[in-house]
Image (spheres, rainbow, N blue to C red):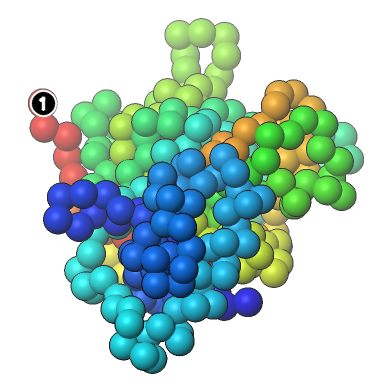
Amino acid sequence: MIWHSLATYRADGIERTGLVVDNALYDLAGLAQLADVDPVRVASGIGAMLADWDATAPTVAGLAECVPGLVSRGMLRAQPAGARYAIPYQPRRIFATASNFYEHADEMGTKLAARSESQPYIFMKAETSVVPTGAAVVMPPETSRLDWEVELAVVIGKTCRHVPVEQALSVIAGYTVFNDISARELNRRTDYPFSHDWFRGKSFDTFGPMGPWLVPAACVPDPQNLRMKLAVNGETMQDGSSAEMIFSIAEQIAYLSRILTLHPGDLIATGTPDGTGMGRGIYLKPGDTMVASIEGIGSIENPVVAEQR
């Protein structure tokens, strides 16, 4: 199978759906016409495609296989290199798994119970926090401890409940890069007996860069063995692997599906390795630029700006 991904991009003021093959972006509807596939099948955007992923995925994979031949015959041209990516799709819900890497938990001063005695700790992050690669992360005046967290994001492609661990990977549509931005001092509360408030510290607008595209699960042979990196101003801060997760992707899906029904478009940010700003004692400031990368998926780049009120 040719590696490919689905993207949403803006051209002439209109958002369109694209297919990325060999780092080149092609208009998906135009490609479908050239390949004698009804463009209506791919014209409704990635969100709609996720709702019927079992039918969509083979169609998209088949279109990717057509790209080299169409390009070699001069029938298909890539979009200009300067095409702007939007978020791949609007997540239905965002679930995030806390302290899912031992070394990250250690750098945060988090004391974990033995794995055999615990379950994933999952909270929700506002879906309105998402922004695409290239967009600014806006630093609100309420925080001086703005932090980064590169995470492998799992996108659900089937409505499911009570999914066994052994079958959990089969409900995944694909993967994308997620940067779980945090206002660290707002993650804690002193005005209530509950010491943590991850929703407040992580749900500001722009606190969820994601993208640059959605890579179908079939293009990622082993999601539990991907290198994860994040750099700030060109300096590597995080350099880990999804192999280091405490609870695997499959275990997280199984756990969530015991609580509620998962739907196509739900996104799970599966945890971050060590190397965060809080662990290092340094934080983001206006003018900084982050690049979050995951092997086999891609990279997103986001500058930091101060909020203007």
Q: What residue is rendered at 60% in x and 58% in y? A: 57
Is 273 positioned to the left or the right of 307 in the image? right
Considering depth in this image, is 40 or 137 the residue closer to the camera?
40
Is 76 positioned to the left or the right of 308 in the image? right
Is 41 positioned to the left or the right of 120 in the image? left
Q: What residue is rendered at 47% in x and 17% in y? A: 189
Farthest residue in the left direction?
309
The quarter of the picture where residue 7 lies is bottom left
Q: Is residue 67 visible?
A: yes
Give the position of the C terminus as an image quadrant: top left
Q: Is residue 280 visible?
A: no
Vertical arrangement, residue 208 with respect to residue 280, above or below: above
Considering depth in this image, is 28 or 118 the residue closer to the camera?
28
Vertical arrangement, residue 290 with respect to residue 253, above or below: below
* Residue 215 position in % (x across, y down): 53, 61
Circle 1 residue: 309
Give the position of the N terminus as an image quadrant: bottom right
Please tell me how crowded label 1 is: few (under 14), some (14-19), or many (20+) other residues with Cα within 10 Å.
few
- Count of numbered badges drawn on the protein: 1
Name the amino acid type tagged 1. Arg
* Residue 188 position in % (x across, y down): 48, 24
SS for callout 1: loop
